[in-house]
Image (cartoon, rainbow, N blue to C red):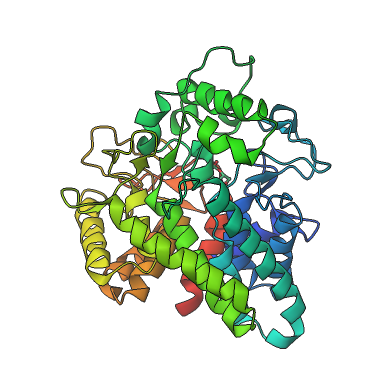
């Protein structure tokens, strides 16, 4: 292992990674080779990092993403700004028919949270008022799209209809519901991800077949979002995803209030409060955490993943936040570095395989934020310390083995660098 880096060196390295992954001053790719386009929640979280280097650039990152919002309000998970055949599935597979191609599914809506934070940090709020108002309207339309299209029965929480939407692509949470997705008839394909990263750290071929079946299935509906929820054999209500949406609704509402955009504020407070109430249905007393719910069967899914702990990013009641802090302590006892993306006591835990065990800094960041807001400082400090230790010993990787700290997946990773800048702000 290399010698540990000090905070100044870490900041410099993080800034270097953001700059080298910057494209035309408009958007930041997650990493060269593996992910050569703009990803939705990567960009939003990366904007937080840009605030330390160039405030205008931070706003630009989000504006570029929202330039590609669909007319129905959806914000796609990938914007294919430039052709690049190093990534699969590319624009020809998605076939969404847009002038600048995009994918046809979405990702965790963290933009509302990020906007408020950017606004709180900005040097001259008046100067950017118009800019921010446009973004507030756009995020509001995205939130409305979620409740309209992904909660057709008005239950208060939204479903994901593809594992990629959760941003936790191969989580153990999806295994059971994924069994319902067929693989017959999919077009032959060649994966590109395994050329850039160790195949043992990536999703399996069986999972990829199902990812693609869903894409082709949705494509056959002309990407009509009013039909896709009910047409999907995969519909899961993820507490982590919903916590991000609820938090973003609250933050967007608070920001809209400051800007005297009263309709937006009221709508978003209402969605947030209803969501928070409905989230309680995902709490599991025996597991002492939230669980995913399979919306096709109505059953909770027996899988103790980080998704259920990420619920603390929303302002859940204190007793729940305390229980989550306790769970994190418990599962971290079995790992050198917190927080593993899956419970190590589960036989399905896999320390190096993507979202089935490894530590991800963006998740550590959001959980830390929620614990701090609940005044659970003791638990949150360890998360920040572990995160910085991982970076200084193993570099700016996509994710890390929680037992050994080994760097996994892609290297020189943008949102990892952005999170380091965030963690270092108080140091
Ligand atoms: C992977 C991750 C997803 C992320 C993307 C780009 O697909 O699972 O969360 O947005 O890579 O970094």
**As rendered, which of 195 and 103 lies closer to the eye?**
103
Where 290 falls versus 344 (above or below)? below
**As rendered, which of 360 and 15 lies closer to the eye?**
360
Q: Residue at x 58, y 25 (%)?
A: 212
Corner quadrant of residue 4: bottom left
Residue 155 percent coordinates (x, y) = 41, 51
Viewer can see residue 277:
yes
Residue 22 percent coordinates (x, y) = 72, 56
The residue at the far left in this view is 286
User: Position of 223 compared to 387: left or right?
Assistant: right
User: Position of 425 compared to 379: left or right?
Assistant: right
User: Position of 126 compared to 209: left or right?
Assistant: right
Q: Residue at x 55, y 69 (%)?
A: 267
Ligand 1 in which quarter: top right
Corner quadrant of residue 361: bottom left
Residue 233 percent coordinates (x, y) = 47, 28
**As rendered, which of 423 and 252 lies closer to the eye?**
252
């Amino acid at each position: 292992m290399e010698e540990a880096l000090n905070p100044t060196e870490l900041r410099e390295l993080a800034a270097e990674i953001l700059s080298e992954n910057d494209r035309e001053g408009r958007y930041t790719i997650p990493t060269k080779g593996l992910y050569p386009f703009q990803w939705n929640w990567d960009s939003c979280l990366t904007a937080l990092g840009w605030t330390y280097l160039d405030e205008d650039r931070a706003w630009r990152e989000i504006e570029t993403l929202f330039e590609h919002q669909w007319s129905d309000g959806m914000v796609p998970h990938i914007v294919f700004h430039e052709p690049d055949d190093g990534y699969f599935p590319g624009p020809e597979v998605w076939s969404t028919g847009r002038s600048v191609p995009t994918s046809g599914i979405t990702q965790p809506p963290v933009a509302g949270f990020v906007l408020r934070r950017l606004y709180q940090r900005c040097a001259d709020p008046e100067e950017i008022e118009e800019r921010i108002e446009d973004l507030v309207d756009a995020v509001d339309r995205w939130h409305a799209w979620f409740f309209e299209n992904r909660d057709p029965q008005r239950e208060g929480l939204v479903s994901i209809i593809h594992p990629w939407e959760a941003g936790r692509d191969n989580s153990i949470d999806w295994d059971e519901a994924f069994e319902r997705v067929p693989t017959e008839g999919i077009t032959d394909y060649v994966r590109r991800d395994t050329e850039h990263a160790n195949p043992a750290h990536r999703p399996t071929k069986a999972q990829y077949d199902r990812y693609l079946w869903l894409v082709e299935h949705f494509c056959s509906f002309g990407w009509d979002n009013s039909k896709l929820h009910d047409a999907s054999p995969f519909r899961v209500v993820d507490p982590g995803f919903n916590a991000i949406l609820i938090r973003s609704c609250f933050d967007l509402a608070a920001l809209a209030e400051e800007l005297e955009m009263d309709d937006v504020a009221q709508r978003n407070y209402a969605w947030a409060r209803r969501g928070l109430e409905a989230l309680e249905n995902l709490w599991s007393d025996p597991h002492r955490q939230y669980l995913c719910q399979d919306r096709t069967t109505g059953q909770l899914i027996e899988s103790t993943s980080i998704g259920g702990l990420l619920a603390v990013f929303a302002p859940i009641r204190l007793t729940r936040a305390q229980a989550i802090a306790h769970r994190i302590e418990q599962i971290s006892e079995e790992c050198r570095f917190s927080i593993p993306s899956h419970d190590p006591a589960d036989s399905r835990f896999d320390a190096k395989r993507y979202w089935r065990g490894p530590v991800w800094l963006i998740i550590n960041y959001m959980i830390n934020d929620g614990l701090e807001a609940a005044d659970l400082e003791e638990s949150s400090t360890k998360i920040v310390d572990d995160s910085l230790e991982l970076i200084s010993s193993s570099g700016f990787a996509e994710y890390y083995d929680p037992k050994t700290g080994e760097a996994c997946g892609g290297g020189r990773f943008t949102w990892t660098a952005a999170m380091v800048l965030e963690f270092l702000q108080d140091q």
